[in-house]
Image: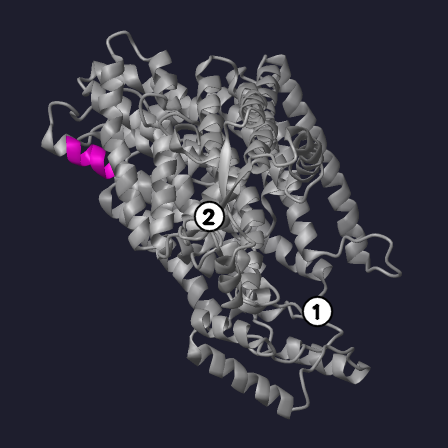
Amino acid sequence: MLFGLDGIEIGIIIVFLTLFGAIMSGFPVAFSIGGAGVISFAIIAALDSSGLLIHQAIDTASAEYAALISDGIARDAISVFRYPELPRVEEALYPNGWQDSVNRELGLIIQRMNERVIAGASIETLLAVAMFVMMGITLERSKIANDLLTTMARVFGPLPGGLAVSIVIVGAFLAASTGIVGATVVTMGLLALPTMLRNNYSPELATGVIAASGTLGQIIPPSIVIVLLGTLAGDIYSTAQENRAQLVGCSDALTYLGEPAVVSVGSLFQAALLPGIFLAFLYGAYAFGFALLNPSKAPPVILDGGRSSVITRNDALVWFLAIPLVLIGGVIVAGMADIVGSQSTIVSSFSQAGEQASLRTNVSEACQAAMIELHGQGAWDLAVAQQAAINDAGGAQLARELTAEELIEARNLAISTAAPIGTGVAILFLGLGLTLALARGINPLADPRPLVIGAAGIVLAFIVDWTLILPTTTPGATFLLLSIPLAIALYGVYHGAGRLAQNELLAVVFPPLVLIVAVLGSILGGITNPTPAAALGAAGAIMLAAYRKLKEEGAGGQYILLSTLALVVMLLFGVNFDLRTGLESTTVGDAIALAIAVVAYHAAFLGLLFACWVLFRNGVLAPVVRETAKVTSMVFTILIGSQLLNLVLISFGGEHYIQQFLRSFDNELTVFLIVMLVLFVLGFVLDFLEIIYIVIPIVGPVIYGGTFDPKWVTIMIAVNLQTSFLTPPFGFALFYLRGVAPAAVTTGHIYRGVVPFVLIQLMGLGILWMFPSIVTIVPNLLP
């Protein structure tokens, strides 16, 4: 054996050394990865053909191996790491020659490209990457980040370390709206770093907080990292759990686990929400604590400018805290008391299927033993009892079509149990009420009568819904009955919006905040998947940027506002009316609603085209499209190149060899800790894209094939990968900041500045390790 190492071990070393050398060569990373695959395969094939690479394989014809098989040990569980005493045989890495491997791998390459790049199940989700990138670049180019930084600095500057805290808040805000590390770090480096240095901030704290806050886009949804990880994690987790189930003697993962082995990008967005906010809190707490301990290095700063109104402490407590809490709490209590709820009378024409046992019990003895070990004897006994009760009742009841009498009875039951106030009405007018309360608090000295009139309209709407609108009332009649209260409420909201626009903080924060809520709310609430939400985000960012440009030119943004209103109309009519075409019969109200929705659709589409024209005319759209194409092309080119590199590892058994090594540890936590340490170390030299597409497919079948929650595993990996942007010497955030930092800021300042934040990252990982419910609580609460 060459250097006393197994041939597969030497092959793995050659692959990764070639990869590191290709990346260090200065060639574009997207092409270096594919080139590393071709070069490493040529080197390994040449050494193998020369007889220098010898693999010490287990002798499957030996009596010792046969004894293990007879003892019931699965073949996949037998490895040189678990049973080093087994007899070995020497063989080449490519027993039939490298030419045969090339012929075999070419077919796999075509299959992989088809599945993961061209027409696979994950392609629709990957399309979200392009649109999230476009959303982020558009918002960055529209100078919204400039306004956020300036405004937040004025608000938090007077506090100890206030400028640093404002950087963290803006970083979290931009993370939720752009998710692009480079754009965020460069923007904050250009705008905030000189201001912090002029006000005697420590260069280490200034550079560290900018670099760290810029990386929050890797974890706070919508995160491109989570989209890419999620598409991989879904496939890896499903396959790994199927293999795990078959290894213990069960037919499939659904039988063994008692639930489908699936994980979606939407559920990962839900899981990432609290960890992202938690990390931002840790950054801000460190900056504030640093300022308290070193007041001369992070002094309070009062910046000039800005528009403000006189708000007393009592007014702020009443209108910004007490009234909103009363309104939200009142709606929640009304919902719990069944005063607010669904008013739908639509019932299924089929009966509900009968109850099923919590676990499948008609399984083999080996599967039964494995399920008892996984779920516990109590869960198995409960499932057996449930199945026995079902059998005694004549077996599981299947869904059947209801008779006409049963349909009438079910509909009458739905009518009698419907809530007096509909959920949609409650949410709509609650939002209007919160707007009025906020407007009153912003300018308490202004005339309150328009806001009182709007509040009266809200009260009238609830009275009308309770007394006049029944579950059987048609959508058209409901719309007409609520039109007068809605018009009165909107009169107050119109005046309130004018007052809100006079507050600089709200004027800057509100527009992108609405976009963030629309995109994330649709994903986190389970309304849609990330791809349509990303399309909504990209279109919304274009219209928001165009509106800003029009305001800079002194022109009105009425067309953009009207197209936004058209989107709201489409949403309201789509929810409350049946807009399907081609039905045998339709109501007059639905026909009118369809006509209005069609007009609104064309208005929104024309508004989007007009927004694109405004950005194109101002020289914004072309750079946005170019940058989007560059980033998206880089991602997909790395995806293709990484598949080639992975297939090289697979061709001589390297991937299987690494997985066998990891599976040789009996402790699942130990395996995951090893993987996390490896990812952390690789983050010093590799970008997150290379780690996701090269390393995760290798170690994923092991760490996703155990008992850990796949959402927790994925978020832990995402937080770990976030450190790859901060760890010297090749942290990309450090390069971005170095490129825009003043000459007085040295590379040493930047490196020393990020060290505390890398330690905070590690502390955050440790907390998520000890308290995994931080990750899982939101997906468990939301659909």
Residue 693 horizontal/vertical position (percent): 52, 34
Spatial CA distance of label 2 from label 1 is 54 Å
**Residue type at mark 1?**
Ile
Residue 409 quadrant:
bottom right
Residue 531, placed above or below residue 170? below
Is residue 493 in view?
no
SS class of the residue under badge 1?
loop
Whichever of labels 2 and 1 marks the residue nearer the N terminus, that label is 1
Q: Residue at x 37, y 46 (%)?
A: 275
Q: Residue furthest top?
A: 743
Q: Which residues are magenta?
A: 284-290
Please tell me how crowded label 2 is: few (under 14), some (14-19), or many (20+) other residues with Cα within 10 Å: some
Q: Residue furthest right?
A: 584
| Between 461 and 365, the one nearer to me in the picture | 365
| Residue hosting label 2 | 660
Q: Quadrant of the N terminus?
A: top left
| Between 446 and 734, the one nearer to me in the picture | 734
Residue 742 horizontal/vertical position (percent): 29, 9
Q: Residue at x 38, y 25 (%)?
A: 685
| Between 586 and 26, the one nearer to me in the picture | 26
